[in-house]
Image (cartoon, rainbow, N blue to C red):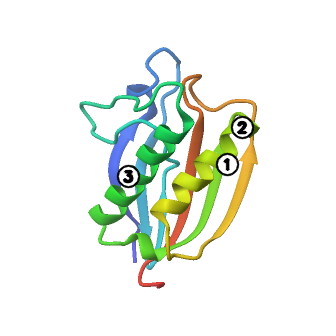
Amino acid sequence: MPHKRHRLHNIRDQHAERNIHSDMCSVVVAGDRIFVRGQVGYTVHATKRRLVGPGDANAQADQAMKNVRQLLEEVGARMEDICKVKVWVIDRAYLEPVMNTVGRHLQGIPCAYTEVIVDGLARPEMLMEVDVEVVKGGA
């Protein structure tokens, strides 16, 4: 079965200030596995992308998890299908509020998870990023 790619785009459309030209998509469905592009505090609306909560890692985490839900629903999956969560923050102080926010969105959905503190993300205004691994119908 061929992979289905959802929300195709070229990275240059979101990073015009850089000379990066790479075809990407927001979600790949490969059988019962679903791969979601790492989500940050930007809304996922293609024409009206905007950063939610500049300077607020908690608000960015909330938006990132709303994005995850929206993208999963668009491909017929549910939050309950999430198996693994990886969270990156750029400051140790952000870890607790971000994990609490992610936890609220995943309440009652036990997941394997990884937390990582990094020096920075793709854009300086990004304070956190969340990545999920999904097996459709896995709950």
Please tell me which residue lies in front, 113 or 96. 96
Which image quarter holds the N terminus?
bottom left
Q: CA distance from mark 2 to mark 1?
A: 7 Å
Q: Amino acid at mark 1?
A: Glu
Q: Secondary structure at mark 2?
A: helix
Q: Horizontal placement of 100 versus 15: left or right?
A: right
Residue 93 is marked as: 2
Residue 66 is marked as: 3
- Please state the horizontal and vertical placement of residue 87, each as a whole percent of the image: 63, 51
The structure residue drawn at horizontal position 48% and vertical position 29%, both measured from the top left corner, is 21
Residue 69 is marked as: none
- Up the image or down, 88 lies above or below 107; here it is above
Q: Amino acid at mark 3?
A: Lys
- Please state the horizontal and vertical placement of residue 104, each as a whole percent of the image: 49, 61
Nearer-N-terminus badge (2/3): 3
Q: CA distance from mark 3 to mark 1?
A: 19 Å
Q: Amino acid at mark 2?
A: Ala
Q: Are marks 2 and 1 in contact (CB under 8 Å)?
A: yes
Q: Secondary structure at mark 3?
A: helix
Nearer-N-terminus badge (3/1): 3
The structure residue drawn at horizontal position 37% and vertical position 72%, both measured from the top left corner, is 78
- Please state the horizontal and vertical placement of residue 56, each as a whole percent of the image: 52, 31
Indicate which label's residue lies in the foreground, 2 or 3. 2
Which residue is denoted by mark 1 in the rendering? 96
Q: Residues within 10 Å of mark 2 (few under 14, many from 20)?
A: few
